Image (spheres, rainbow, N blue to C red):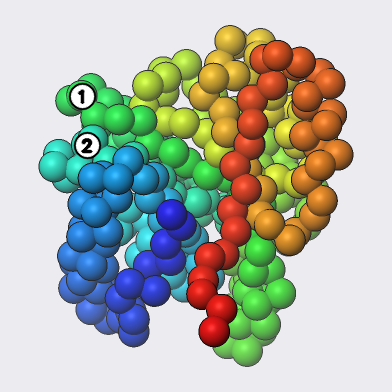
Amino acid sequence: VSVKPSAVAANPSAVAFDATVARMVSHLRPICDAARTHDVFVNLDMEEYKEFALTVEVFAALLSDPTLDAQPIGVVLQAYLPDSHAAFARLSSMAATRRDRGGTPVKIRLVKGANLAAERVEAELHGWTPAPYATKAEVDASYKRLIEAALDPALVGAVRLGVASHNLFDIAWAEGLAATTNQRDRLDFEMLAGMADARPLYQHRLARHGTQFKPGRLYAPIGSCR
């Protein structure tokens, strides 16, 4: 289950930051408690940059709660934001502490970022420097640096890596890097329904790995049609 913080606690306040974090955590706890009874993974999605610090802080609060150590949880980090590297370092360190006290691994889902146009418009309207990297080359390099950091052997048992991409090269690169350190079992390959046809990517990986092929995760919206 992928949850946006703003969907569980509306009207976040930058002025009342700590209070907003506490409110969001209090709304997420019942979701985590219900998910645990049904063995459901809860993913905290990332939104626009203005919610970045809030989302990281909410996830850090969940990570630091020992009563949630058995709940499989994860968070999304966007490679097009330079801030994601410091956030990854902090959250992965907290995940290692959680592991050391007997908790389950944390999933960190790496994406490149989907709000670039909105971030540019927001920055231009206010006369700000846009939060994301300026070029695609910088974003691609950032994505690979985050993957490399997540595959640090010191994070075995603490962090699982969600490689969220429809780019065959990125998928193959991540898989090759993991294979060199015997960490393929720490990778999950993830895609969004409707973004692109996933079949060629999975056909390629099936042909490459045969019986060792590892299925991926496809995120899709669910709702009722009336």
* Quadrant of image for the N terminus: bottom left
Give the labeled residue for mark 1.
102
From where the camera sits, is residue 18 visible? no
Please tell me which residue is depicted at 18% across the width and 65% down the height of the picture. 26
> As shown in the figure, which amino acid type bears the numbered disc 1?
Gly
Q: Nearer the viewer, residue 101 or 226?
A: 226
- Farthest front residue in view: 226
Instruction: Look at the numbered disc 1 and give the secondary structure of its residue.
Output: loop
Please tell me which residue is depicted at 23% across the width and 35% down the height of the picture. 70
* Picture disc at residue 140: none
Looking at the image, do the residues carrying marks 1 and 2 touch, with CB atoms under 8 Å apart?
yes
Counting residues from the N terminus, which is met first, the one under dot 1 or under dot 2? 2
* Quadrant of image for the C terminus: bottom right
* Picture disc at residue 69: 2
> As shown in the figure, which amino acid type bears the numbered disc 2?
Asp
Counting from the top left corner in percent of width and height, residue 210 is at 76, 15
Distance of label 1 from label 2 (alpha carbons): 7 Å
Q: Is residue 51 left or right of residue 35?
A: right
Please tell me which residue is depicted at 26% across the width and 44% down the height of the picture. 36
Q: Is residue 62 above or below residue 184?
A: below
Q: Is residue 136 left or right of residue 90?
A: right
